[in-house]
Amino acid sequence: MAEAAGGQPALLADRLGFTWPTGHRALNHCSFSIPRPGLWMLVGGNGCGKSTLLRLIAGLLEPSEGQLQRPLKPALVFQNPDHQLLLPSCGSDIELSLPSHLPSSERLERVTHALQQVGLGGFRQRPIHSLSGGQKQRLAIAGALASDAQLLLLDEPTALLDETSQQEVINLIHQLCHRGEQPITALWITHRLEELNWCDGAALMERGSIGPWQAGTTLQNQLRPLATRKG
């Protein structure tokens, strides 16, 4: 695979390890790289280390061993947007992501631009409690974009959404990852095999380690018989 501009991967993890205070080892010699902007997906069962990995990349946890290179600014988008939307209106919540030194005119411009990027133009004064689940998730993504994050870490962002909202969110992230100017990089955790149709590369995570990147449809075909048998 080609690497990001300048030959530098968008993310590089080298033999990452992480052990919780309880003694549970969540990551075990986990090595992988994201070579370029795009939508990259991880699939794995509960307890395989996916969410722990995202928190390490976001800087919320420190690895017990190994190295992590993050040339892009990361931002974590939670499964439940209510866990990260804190203020009453769309605009005021996005402002939390902006540097405090910006003048008011630039703050307004950046809030407006962030909302437009996620299809919520005109929602600046809209109360958050009036939004649908899909709109809340898109607002959380707008906050990440407003912070100038270029690496979005999405922890099952469609798990709590209806089918229409699922499509809206995954289509939005796909568009952001493939736009002509300043495409972002997204690392997306999923349990939904149908979502692998959208990705640039997919990998299976098991027992704290990640396998090689492969086409989403290839991994989908490998895992579908297993999912059918479990069902």
Image (cartoon, rainbow, N blue to C red):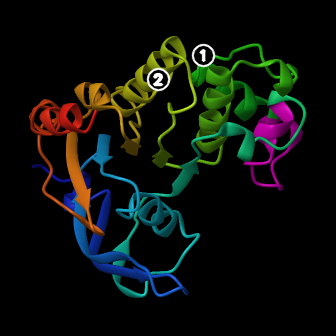
Residue 88 found in image quarter = top right
Judge whether residue 200 can be spotted in this image. no
Q: Is residue 210 above or below residue 14?
A: above
Residue 184 found in image quarter = top left
Give the Cα distance between marks 2 and 1: 8 Å
Does the magenta segment cover residue 83?
A: no
* Image spot of residue 226 (x, y percent): 17, 39
Name the one closer to the observer, 50 or 230. 230
**Count of picture labels:** 2
Q: Secondary structure at mark 1?
A: loop
Residue 129 found in image quarter = top right
Judge whether residue 211 can be spotted in this image. yes
* Image spot of residue 131 (x, y percent): 76, 19
Asked whether disc 2 touches disc 1, contact meaning CB atoms under 8 Å apart, the reply is yes
Q: Secondary structure at mark 2?
A: helix
Q: Residue at x 32, y 56 (%)?
A: 10
Name the one closer to the observer, 112 or 211. 211
Does the magenta segment cover residue 104?
A: yes
Q: Which residue lies under the disc numbered 2?
A: 172
Task: Give the extent of the magenta segment.
Answer: 91-107
* Image spot of residue 9 (x, y percent): 25, 60
Task: Work out whether mark 2 precedes mark 1 in sequence or the reverse, and give the earlier one.
Answer: 1
Q: Amino acid at mark 2?
A: Leu
Residue 160 in the figure: left or right of residue 198: right
Residue 31 in the figure: left or right of residue 82: left
Q: Amino acid at mark 1?
A: Gly
* Image spot of residue 161 (x, y percent): 56, 24
Q: Which residue lies under the disc numbered 1?
A: 119
Q: Residue at x 78, y 17 (%)?
A: 123
Residue 153 in the figure: left or right of residue 82: left
